[in-house]
Amino acid sequence: MPLHNFKKGELGHWLQVVADNSAGEKEYEPVPAEFVDALTTLRCVKRNDAGLLIVTEKGRLALHMDGSGEF
């Protein structure tokens, strides 16, 4: 049984939100905890020294493969 029941594209959407938040070019949008947990488990995001979410290399690759990412 899956840990999370996300709809298609939801993880990609929230990964892009994390990327946008860390770039600071758009208004900050909070990411729901269940998506933070899932993206952290998948090693697509991590927390920096200040505790802010940032996109990892794996996350950048996922955004690139999705085609919706600007990274």
Image (cartoon, rainbow, N blue to C red):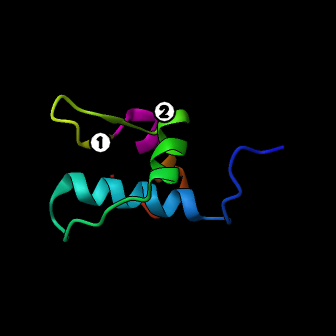
Furthest-right residue in this view? 1
Q: Residue 66, percent across and down?
A: 54, 57
Q: Residue at x 27, y 60 (%)?
A: 20
Per the image, label 2 sits on a secondary structure element best described as: loop
Which residues make up the magenta segment? 55-61
**Which numbered circle lies on residue 71?**
none
Q: Quadrant of residue 52?
A: top left
Q: Quadrant of residue 11?
A: bottom right
Tell me which label, 1 or 2, sits earlier in the chain.
2
Q: Is residue 71 left or right of residue 67?
A: left
Look at label 1 and name its amino acid. Ile
Q: Residue 4, percent across and down?
A: 68, 50
Q: Label 1 belongs to which residue?
A: 54
Per the image, label 1 sits on a secondary structure element best described as: strand
Q: Label 2 belongs to which residue?
A: 43
Q: Residue at x 29, y 66 (%)?
A: 29
Q: Quadrant of residue 46?
A: top left
CA distance separating discs 1 and 2: 11 Å
Q: Tell me if mark 2 has few (under 14), some (14-19) or many (20+) residues whose alpha carbon lies within 10 angstroms of its own.
A: some
Q: 3 or 22, which is in the foreground? A: 3
Furthest-bottom residue in this view? 27
